[in-house]
Each structure stands twice: as structure tokens, then as C-alpha cells.
Image (tube, grey):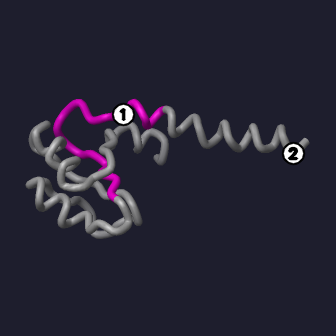
Amino acid sequence: MRLEVAILFFSMLVAPLAHLSGSVPERVGLVVMIVPPWSDASVVAEDAGAQLIGPTRAPFGQLVSIDNMAQAEQLEKAGAWFLLDAEKVESICG
């Protein structure tokens, strides 16, 4: 019985993560920038010339507006772990 419950919870976790893993932004606009907890998201965005969106912050993620795909590369060089397409994240989180 424990194995079945573990498999159920594991599959509930993996499905959204698998959906997000293919969500690298392909166009300009809003992206979710994931940064390490020891980094300041505002500094990372500022270094890349991007603009943070929203008054609140999550421990790892932050909405960022990018004007061109070069800014996406600059965000990663400035310290972002990865970027997610904000529309796909919204489809999971609502």
C-alpha cells in the first residue's frame, strides 16, 4: 500500500515538472526567472537589463519582463538558474 501511495504522489509531482521543463521562453514578454536563494533577483534582472514585475517575491521565482531574447541569455549569465514561459506556468498554477 505504501508503494502505491508513493508512486501516486511522485507522479503528481513529476507531471507538472515535466510540463514546465519544456517551457523555455521562445518569445519576448513575461518569463518566470528562477534564482538561487542566495542571489537577489533584482540584482540579476538589473544586470541583464530586464524589469521585475510585481510587488511580491517568491523564495526562488520572480516574474520578469524581457524585451528581446538576448536579455534571456543575459539573465542566465547574471545568475538565473533557468527561465520558464510565464503562460505555461500560469496554466498549471492558475
Asked if labels 1 and 2 touch by Cβ distance under 8 angstroms, the answer is: no
Disc 2 vs disc 1: which is toward the camera?
A: 2
Check the picture and name the quadrant holding the N terminus: top right
Disc 1 marks which residue? 23
Within-10-Å neighbours for mark 1: few <14, some 14–19, many 20+: some
**Label 2 – label 1 distance at C-alpha:** 33 Å
Above-or-below relation of 21 to 45: above
- Is 34 part of what is drawn in magenta? yes
Task: Decide if residue 4 is on the left or right side of residue 40.
Answer: right
Q: What residue type is labelled 2?
A: Arg
Under circle 2, the secondary element is helix
User: Which residue does the image show at 17% across and 41% down from the upper left?
Assistant: 73
Of the pair 14 and 37, the residue shown nearer to us: 37
User: Which residue does the image show at 30% across and 44% down from the upper left?
Assistant: 83
Task: Decide if residue 18 is on the left or right side of residue 26.
Answer: right
Q: What residue type is labelled 1?
A: Ser
User: Which residue does the image show at 27% across and 52% down from the upper left?
Assistant: 80
Q: What stretch is highlighted in magenta?
A: 19-35
User: Which residue does the image show at 48% across and 41% down from the upper left?
Assistant: 92
